[in-house]
């Protein structure tokens, strides 16, 4: 249980600064430190148990479907990292307390820092691959927030974005790698995975997995060629840099390689790739550390270099190399944290980090100078400091390893070169800042920082020295535990300062002599390298991203071009290609039922249909003619229905045809009669091909379906129409009963369409065309007397007919839909004959409620059946007899049909009336006021939010 | 009788009708916008609980037995989708109160919102393929009306593209339904599924499957059929954008999940490749489209497309885990994508623009908004422990299981591009300082033009944003129970027998439920066909 708390406390610690930020910085800093300190103590309390060889594990299942457990372990490796993360973390909190400026939001800073710390502790203690990855991503996220802490600075934003992108990419590779790894091991439990190294190495997916995992580790630990984000992460406040570079973030990749070492390391591939990448990184980083003039830049590249060193050791992979790697992790964390904090102090007190502006600071800041010198000595590997010990071990291992086969001599040679560079840049750092006289004045007059700000540096430097002097006493226990965790068996070793005069010592001496010489002449070297144009990694990175954006914009533009025609073209093409693949698989288009006998009338009908269709398209530039051709299609569709004994459908089609034609004509009135030629002949050919092929495909499909016999549910409708639905007219019973729910949806569509058109037309301001397409002036007699009188006579008649059609609909062809259309036609005629003004006076009520009431009536009729405990829309009917009239039938379906009727009438007239109003004075009363506010809104909307 | 399966359709329908009847009463419409959606949320929860305990809830419309009448059926998938719809609907109802202009309110914004929701829930709950078409139409026409409500030129242009392409989708859908009916003689999806097992597989089935795929692919905005979406979604008022982003494409995806697990489950082998690569291209083109954009809502629109790819990928991989992941992605996306649009509305109100270059400084000014955006955006990019991570994770895991390495790799890479895109927005709007040339509109300060309204209205905008951001976080933390439901959905979808039996009765599995006489004749034509064929 304590394991859970160790992992959880820092996470809870995220809330502490958020809650205490109001109460002043000192309180907040103290409160923030409490939880990690507790976690540190709890970690230490577990050490005795660990020394007894106990397996410290904690596990609860979290998401069993995903093999994700909340599982933690504390072994030697976790212990080492926990101590670093929590210990240095506490020092960073103390340091940041003094570092941040007064007005900076420190609560936010601490919260992010704690999140970072918690995720690192999580990585170090995870006993489940996926859990580990979760924390891994959290470090990317929290470091993003930390690096971008000074978010008003462009370099901070860009550095943060770059770090997140690079480590995020690595993280995703790692996810895939870990999933593969778990799959290969058959478990996501760390213990199981580590124990199944043989199985994993034998798996054919091993190279893929290894590549992905290493990608994750290398990006995180800034290994070449993914190192470039790290120097740019220097835009972060120095406490963050110190933490990021010593104990956290970049160490996560190293940790991962160490953690998974037993499972994935035992192959040639691993040794070669990891040690080569490591050695390149080491030299590359060291070289640039020597070239940089920014204090933090030097330290950043030296971090890259040291990470490379550790990676080489992990690549070599012998037990002593692992030990050396772990030791160097510890040493590097201490001296690098100290150096960064010193750099922060210098920056803080002088206002600059540029070497040019710094110099001679030993007078003003003697203590800081001493501390920095000692830490830098550790970094350079001066004897009696901790860095010396692990570097000697590195040299020893580089001599002993057979990794590179015949060119094994290369490794010690390059290691010595790394040592030379490391001595040179350490020397330069100390000398240029503290001892060499300044060339320019720093922005601020330097003086020593507050003592407590220096305290973390002092602690760390003391550690460097003490470990360097008494390595056996200070580090053996910890390293024993840690190396056992990585190697799997206890390792017998003895840390000592003096091993006698041997090759590694000679290599060290060489490094010092040449390193000092190199610094002495490094001005020449710099001048030499300045001839080469430097590459700004960030610039390259951004340029790549911009070009991705640009390319994709081009790609999208090429695909769509913001052209509706092209969209439609793509759509049909996709449909055609995808459907065509299926169509060629149909073995026999003609089904078992065969063809129907043809007769003259059928052929004529079919020809007329085709003619209508083709003519509509061909005459599309002459809108009126095209519309007429369209009506030919409609008419023949109606005739087809009639021919195949569907009188209801024929009636419906006819009345729909009439209404739509009239409405379309009204709309055409406002449009030019002709449209210019818009498509090139080539495009016409293309479109014709596309349309023709599509038509053929659809026709073939229809043919194939219709020549096959199927067993349809329609017989049920025929049989149950009367006994179950109480009506002889099957179509109507289907509409209002069997499938009344469809109808409900459709009348809703109609009502909404009415609303939409109402809205669309309401804003329109159209001019009445003076003349028709040929320039003929419209007749001044707008309301011909004959039409007027006929329409007047027709109206009651039509209403009567529609009532009749409506009432008989349940048993004879008819019903609410047709009746509604007939009513609408009659009213349309009236509108046309007498004009909107006249009709408006007499039909002075808004139509939208009519349609809505229709929908409501239909819905409520359906709901009515619930009162009787039946499902929605269950109909009831009964026969009643009245004197004189006789027996008649009443069905709830009739009520539903009434809803349909009202919806149809309402929607149609809503469209019509509004279309009519466009040209008359009879616009809605709210119109003028509405126009004003709308216009005002339109002009102001450019500046104001809606 | 189980009213909870019909109420999620009927309540918004009635709310819409009531709001329309009170055409002139703004308070009444605003009241209904909240009350109606609260009611919808309640019945949706009811339905969800019912499906959790019973697996399936059905109602036969008009009491007609199953293949003949229209069946409403909720399985876990439907119930989850309806529940999400209700949550989005309520969030939108509240948000709209603060953002909807008088002009919109006057022309029926709220009723249209209700009717749109009715269309969406109807599509989720129907068990009848033609009825599905009907609800698609309700949805389409309602969304069209909402798009044109502003009447601005850009909105018209977007709306025309939107309606043209969606109408074509409807045409294809309707044709496919007609052909399907011609083939199997029934419209009830469970019944179709049964008969499909018996139908001769002569390529017709494949063609039909492709037609459905194209039709739903357009609705879902999948590659190469997505163009209407980025052309139109950034034009209407932000609440409408958010509503569309959260719901509409998801209905298309839902229909794919339904149809391809129930009806065309036998055909998947052939279609799987098309679907898989369609999904991959959808992911990639979407995210690439976003890369070049600097308009907040257009970036988000392209990301809708990209995310659709993940969902379809889940279906295309066609294992229970993958489908669970796909549905997880839908649920997560509904929350997160809606929320991102809502946030874009707030930032627009605060800074008067959607152009990233002209915005900035909100990190310091509006920390809570920054947190909400951070959660939503990083969730969209699939960063743990937020909701999007689990969706992506499950799909990736399923992809690796079936060794679809390329598709999985691309899915991961797209996640990275998404992250980059979100960071772009974050850097520009939140971290960067406000550029000098952006004169923050007066409405941002309480003394502004509409200042009297601003304080409460901003609160109404914040409330849904905060709740949705919190849900994204909670979905991540409590992913376990959600994953449990998702696994249940995966099992239900890939084992359609339960669905079929729920609709047609337990005997359905043994034999077709057509009339007894019909069953007898069923054998004959087939035998004849065999003999007549040369």
Image (cartoon, coloured by chain):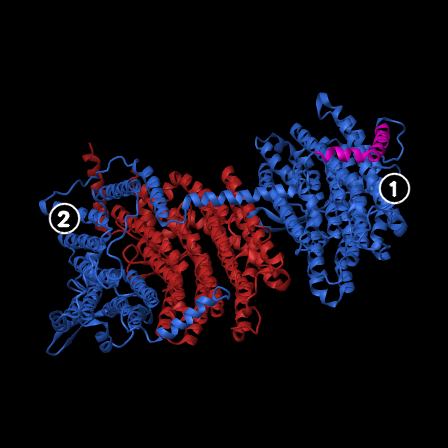
Q: What label does residue B314 carry, if any?
A: none
Q: Position of residue B392 (x, y in %)?
A: 53, 48
> Which chain is blue in the rendering?
A
Q: Secondary structure at mark 2?
A: helix
Left or right, B370 with respect to A52, comes to left
* Vertical side of B188 occupied by A316: above or below: above
Visible residue check, residue B3? no
Between disc 1 and disc 2, whose residue precedes? 1
Q: Chain ID for label 1? A: A
Most common SS among magenta residues? helix
Q: Chain ID for label 2? A: A
Residue A272 among those drawn in magenta: no
Which of the two marks, 1 or 2, is nearer to us in this view? 2
Which residue, as the protein is rendered here, is positioned at the far top?
A: A406
Q: Secondary structure at mark 1?
A: helix
Q: Position of residue A409 (x, y in %)?
A: 76, 23
Which residue range is magenta in the image? A504-531
Distance (Cα) linking label 1 and label 2: 105 Å
Q: What label does residue A473 carry, if any?
A: 1
Check disc 2 and report the residue beneath it: A605
**Contact? badges 1 and 2 (CB < 8 Å):** no
**Quadrant in the picture for residue A192:** top right
* Vertical side of A572 occupied by A817: above or below: below
């Amino acid at each position: 249980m304590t394991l859970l708390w160790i992992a959880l406390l820092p996470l809870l610690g995220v809330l502490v600064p958020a809650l205490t930020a109001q109460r002043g910085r000192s309180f907040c800093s103290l409160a923030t430190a409490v939880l990690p300190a507790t976690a540190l103590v709890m970690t230490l309390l577990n050490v005795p148990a660990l020394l007894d060889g106990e397996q410290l594990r904690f596990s609860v299942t979290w998401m069993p479907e995903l093999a994700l457990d909340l599982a933690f372990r504390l072994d030697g490796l976790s212990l080492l990292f926990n101590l670093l993360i929590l210990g240095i973390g506490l020092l960073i909190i103390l340091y940041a307390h003094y570092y941040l400026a007064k007005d900076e939001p420190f609560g936010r800073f601490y919260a992010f820092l704690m999140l970072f710390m918690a995720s690192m502790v999580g990585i170090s203690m995870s006993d489940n691959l996926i859990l580990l990855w979760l924390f891994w991503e959290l470090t990317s996220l929290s470091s993003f927030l930390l690096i971008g802490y000074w978010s008003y600075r462009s370099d901070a934003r860009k550095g943060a974005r770059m770090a997140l992108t690079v480590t995020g990419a690595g993280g995703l590779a790692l996810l895939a790698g870990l999933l593969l790894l778990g799959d290969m091991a058959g478990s996501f439990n760390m213990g199981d995975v580590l124990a199944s190294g043989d199985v994993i190495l034998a798996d054919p997916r091993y190279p893929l997995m290894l590549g992905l995992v290493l990608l994750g580790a290398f990006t995180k630990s800034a290994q070449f060629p993914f190192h470039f984000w790290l120097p740019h992460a220097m835009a972060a406040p120095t406490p963050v840099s110190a933490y990021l570079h010593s104990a956290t973030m970049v160490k996560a990749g190293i940790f991962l390689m160490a953690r998974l070492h037993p499972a994935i390391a035992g192959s040639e591939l691993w040794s070669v790739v990891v040690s080569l990448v490591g050695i390149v990184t080491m030299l590359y980083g060291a070289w640039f550390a020597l070239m940089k003039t920014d204090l933090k830049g030097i330290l950043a590249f030296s971090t890259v270099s040291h990470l490379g060193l550790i990676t080489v050791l992990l690549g070599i992979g012998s037990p002593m190399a692992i030990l050396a790697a772990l030791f160097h992790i510890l040493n590097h964390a201490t001296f690098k944290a100290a150096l960064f904090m010193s750099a922060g102090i210098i920056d803080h007190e002088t206002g600059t980090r540029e070497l040019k502006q710094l110099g001679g600071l030993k007078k003003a800041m003697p203590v800081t100078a001493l501390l920095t010198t000692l830490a830098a000595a550790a970094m350079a590997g001066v004897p009696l400091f901790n860095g010396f010990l692990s570097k000697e071990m590195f040299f020893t291992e580089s001599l002993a390893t057979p990794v590179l086969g015949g060119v094994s001599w290369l490794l010690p040679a390059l290691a010595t070169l790394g040592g030379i560079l490391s001595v040179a840049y350490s020397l330069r750092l100390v000398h240029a800042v503290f001892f060499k006289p300044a060339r320019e004045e720093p922005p601020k007059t330097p003086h020593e920082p507050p003592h407590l700000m220096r305290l973390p540096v002092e602690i760390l430097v003391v550690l460097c020295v003490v470990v360097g002097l008494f390595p056996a006493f200070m580090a053996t226990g910890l390293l024993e535990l840690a190396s056992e965790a990585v190697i799997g068996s206890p390792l017998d070793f003895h840390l000592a300062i003096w091993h006698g005069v041997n090759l590694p010592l000679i290599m060290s001496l060489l490094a010092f002599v040449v390193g000092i010489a190199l610094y002495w002449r490094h001005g020449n070297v710099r001048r030499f390298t300045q001839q080469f144009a430097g590459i700004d990694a960030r610039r390259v990175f951004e340029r790549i991203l911009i070009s991705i954006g640009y390319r994709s914009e081009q790609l999208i533009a090429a695909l769509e071009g913001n052209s509706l025609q092209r969209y439609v073209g793509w759509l049909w093409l996709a449909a055609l290609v995808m459907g065509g693949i299926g169509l060629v698989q149909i073995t026999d288009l003609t089904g078992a039922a065969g063809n129907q006998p043809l007769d003259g009338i059928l052929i004529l009908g079919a020809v007329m249909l085709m003619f209508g269709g083709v003519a509509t398209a061909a005459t599309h530039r002459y809108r009126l003619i095209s519309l007429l051709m369209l009506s030919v299609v409609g008419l023949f569709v109606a005739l087809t229905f009639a021919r195949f004994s569907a009188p209801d459908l024929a009636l419906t089609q006819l009345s729909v045809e009439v209404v739509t034609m009239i409405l379309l004509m009204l709309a055409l009135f406002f449009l030019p009669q002709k449209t210019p030629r818009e498509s090139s002949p080539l495009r016409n050919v293309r479109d014709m091909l596309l349309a023709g092929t599509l038509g053929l495909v659809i026709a073939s499909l229809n043919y194939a379906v219709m020549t096959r016999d199927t067993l349809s549910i329609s017989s049920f409708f025929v049989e149950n129409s009367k006994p179950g639905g109480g009506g002889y007219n099957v179509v109507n019973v289907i509409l209002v009963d069997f499938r009344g729910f469809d109808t409900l949806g459709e009348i809703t569509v109609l009502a909404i369409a009415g609303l939409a058109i109402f809205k669309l037309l309401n804003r329109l301001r159209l001019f009445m065309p003076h003349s028709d397409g040929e320039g003929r002036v419209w007749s001044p007699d707008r309301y011909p007397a004959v039409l007027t009188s006929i329409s007047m006579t027709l109206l009651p008649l039509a209403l009567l007919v529609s009532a009749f059609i409506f009432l008989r609909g349940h048993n004879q062809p008819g019903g609410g839909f047709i009746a509604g259309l007939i009513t609408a036609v009659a009213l349309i005629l009236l509108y046309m004959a007498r004009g909107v003004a006249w009709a408006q006076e007499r039909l002075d009520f808004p139509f939208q409620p009519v349609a809505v009431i229709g929908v409501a009536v239909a819905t409520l009729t359906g709901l009515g059946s619930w009162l009787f405990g039946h499902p929605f829309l269950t109909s009831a009917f009964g026969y009643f007899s009245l004197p004189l009239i006789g027996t008649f039938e009443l069905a709830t379906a009739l009520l539903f049909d009434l809803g349909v009727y009202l919806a149809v009438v309402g929607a149609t007239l809503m469209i019509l009336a509004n279309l009519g109003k466009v040209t008359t004075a009879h616009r809605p009363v709210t119109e003028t006021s509405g126009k004003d506010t709308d216009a005002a809104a339109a002009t102001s909307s450019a500046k104001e939010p809606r | 009788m189980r009213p909870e399966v019909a109420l999620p359709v009927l309540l918004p329908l009635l709310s819409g009708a009531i709001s329309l009847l009170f055409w002139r009463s703004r308070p009444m419409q605003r009241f209904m916008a909240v009350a109606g959606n609260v009611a919808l949320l309640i019945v949706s929860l009811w339905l969800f609980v019912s499906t959790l305990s019973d697996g399936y809830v059905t109602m036969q419309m008009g009491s007609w037995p199953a293949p003949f009448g229209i069946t409403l059926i909720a399985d876990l998938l439907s119930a989850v989708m309806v529940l999400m719809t209700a949550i989005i609907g309520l969030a939108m109802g509240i948000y709209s109160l603060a953002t909807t202009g008088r002009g919109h309110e006057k022309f029926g914004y709220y009723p249209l919102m209700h009717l749109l929701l009715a269309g969406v829930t109807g599509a989720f709950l129907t068990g009848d393929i033609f009825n599905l078409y009907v609800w698609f139409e309700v949805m389409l026409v309602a969304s069209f009306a909402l798009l044109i409500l502003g009447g601005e030129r850009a909105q018209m242009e977007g709306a025309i593209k939107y309606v043209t392409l969606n109408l074509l989708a409807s045409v294809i859908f309707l044709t496919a339904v007609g052909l399907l009916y011609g083939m199997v003689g029934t419209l009830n999806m469970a019944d179709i599924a049964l008969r499909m097992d018996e139908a001769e597989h002569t390529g017709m089935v494949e063609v039909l499957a492709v037609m459905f795929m194209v039709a739903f692919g357009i609705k879902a905005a999948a590659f190469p059929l997505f163009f209407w979406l980025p052309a139109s979604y950034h034009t209407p008022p932000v609440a409408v954008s958010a509503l569309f982003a959260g719901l509409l494409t998801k209905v298309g995806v839902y229909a794919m999940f339904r149809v391809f697990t129930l009806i065309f489950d036998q055909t998947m082998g052939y279609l799987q490749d098309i679907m898989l690569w369609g999904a991959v291209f959808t992911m990639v083109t979407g995210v690439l489209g976003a890369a070049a954009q600097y308009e907040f809502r257009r970036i988000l629109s392209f990301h809708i497309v990209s995310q659709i790819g993940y969902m379809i990928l889940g279906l295309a991989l066609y294992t229970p885990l993958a489908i669970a992941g796909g549905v997880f992605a839908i649920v997560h996306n509904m929350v997160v994508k809606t929320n991102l649009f809502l946030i874009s509305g707030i930032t627009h109100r605060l800074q008067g623009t959607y152009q990233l270059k002209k915005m900035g400084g909100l990190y310091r000014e509006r920390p809570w908004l920054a947190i909400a955006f951070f959660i939503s955006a990083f969730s969209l990019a699939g960063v743990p422990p937020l909701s999007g991570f689990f969706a992506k994770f499950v799909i990736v895991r399923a992809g690796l299981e079936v060794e679809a390495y390329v598709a999985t790799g691309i899915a991961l890479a797209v996640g990275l591009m998404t992250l980059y895109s979100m960071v772009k927005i974050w850097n520009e709007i939140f971290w960067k300082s406000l550029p000098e040339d952006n004169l923050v509109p007066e409405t941002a300060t309480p003394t502004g033009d509409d200042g009297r309204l601003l304080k409460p209205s901003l609160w109404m905008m914040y409330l849904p944003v905060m709740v949705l951001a919190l849900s994204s976080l909670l979905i991540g933390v409590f992913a376990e129970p959600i994953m449990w439901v998702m696994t249940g959905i995966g099992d239900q979808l890939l084992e359609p027998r339960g669905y079929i039996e729920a609709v047609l009765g337990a005997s359905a599995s043994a034999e077709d439920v057509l009339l007894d006489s019909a069953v007898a004749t069923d054998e004959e034509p087939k035998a004849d066909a065999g003999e007549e064929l040369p």
